[in-house]
């Protein structure tokens, strides 16, 4: 059986977040290790899937890509929301950052961080770096390799770019007053992987874009057994009213 669907950016983020929450590596760490969820728009959805409730918008983000005059206007969060750290299944949001928690992690523990760019077929993501010390990504890179932590990268197909991330990373370093682009490798989870994790069905992207709220959307053709298609239909119906971030 086949099913065609269009996912808005917000629907994709919710779907990806559910895929991350149900990834075998994450489920194992949930019971037996430590998970750190970095800040970001997509990862805020991931945090919500762990917490079971919605986080106040913009309370779990860092840098944002916005138009000149955002509509509706951005409202500052009413309070402080600390980084989400999960140890042995217990939630901790007491002020410890993911970068700080990573220093005490062990092999098999998990860090979840979003991306700003994607080369899907090459399985490479990119993270914009504007902080002189490398920001969150810069603070994580040593412990990731030193402790052999599992790195989950939830990223929507909307982030696919035509340039080679490794090549453009070098280009961004030369006489560029703006951001650098750091290549990242790990377990990349897009809408495609999320659908596979959640239902067993296979998805391919056949188009992108739209208008009147479908800007940045992805059009997917999903194939699978009848029970797999029914499962993903139910999930798509459940996330169908996901409000734009």
Image (spheres, rainbow, N blue to C red):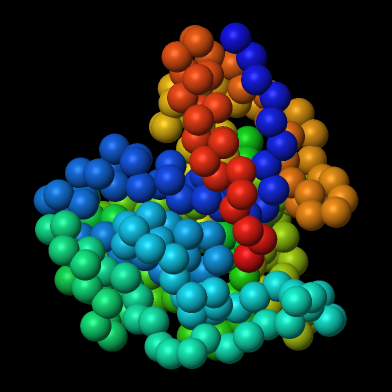
Closer-to-camera residue (121/174) = 121
Residue 70 visible in image: yes
In percent of width and height, residue 110 lies at 29, 56
Look at 15% across and 49% down and name the residue there.
Answer: 31
Q: Image quarter for residue 138?
A: bottom left
Q: What is the quadrant of the C terminus in the image?
A: bottom right
Q: Residue furthest right?
A: 211
Residue at (52, 86) in percent of width and height: 77
Q: Position of residue 40 (x, y in %)?
A: 52, 69
Left or right: residue 231 versus residue 170 is left
Q: Residue at x 34, y 40 (%)?
A: 23
Quarter of the view holding residue 93: bottom left
- Residue 214 left/right relative to 229: right
70 sits to left or right of 138: right
Q: Is the residue 165 above or below the residue 15 in the image?
A: below
Q: Would you place residue 232 above or below residue 213 in this image?
A: above
- Horizontal and vertical percent for residue 119? 65, 45
């Amino acid at each position: 059986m086949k099913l065609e669907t269009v996912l808005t950016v917000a629907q994709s983020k919710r779907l990806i977040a559910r895929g991350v929450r149900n990834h075998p590596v994450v489920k194992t760490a949930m019971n037996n290790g430590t998970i750190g969820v970095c800040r970001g728009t997509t990862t805020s959805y991931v945090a919500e899937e762990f917490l079971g409730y919605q986080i106040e918008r913009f309370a779990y983000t860092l840098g944002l890509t916005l138009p000149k005059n955002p509509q509706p206007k951005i409202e500052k969060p009413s309070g402080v929301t600390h980084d989400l750290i999960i140890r042995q299944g217990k939630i901790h949001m007491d002020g410890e950052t993911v970068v700080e928690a990573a220093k005490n992690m062990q092999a098999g523990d998990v860090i979840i961080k979003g991306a700003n760019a994607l080369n899907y077929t090459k399985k490479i993501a990119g993270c914009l770096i504007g902080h002189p010390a490398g920001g969150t990504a810069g603070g994580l890179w040593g412990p990731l390799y030193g402790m052999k932590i599992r790195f989950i990268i939830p990223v929507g197909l909307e982030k696919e770019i035509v340039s080679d991330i490794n090549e453009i990373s070098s280009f961004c370093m030369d006489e560029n007053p703006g951001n650098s682009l750091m290549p990242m490798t790990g377990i990349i989870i897009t809408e495609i992987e999320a659908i596979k994790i959640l239902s067993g069905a296979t998805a391919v992207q056949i188009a992108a874009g739209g208008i009147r709220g479908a800007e940045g959307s992805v059009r997917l053709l999903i194939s699978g057994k009848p029970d797999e298609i029914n499962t993903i239909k139910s999930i798509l119906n459940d996330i169908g009213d996901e409000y734009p971030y």
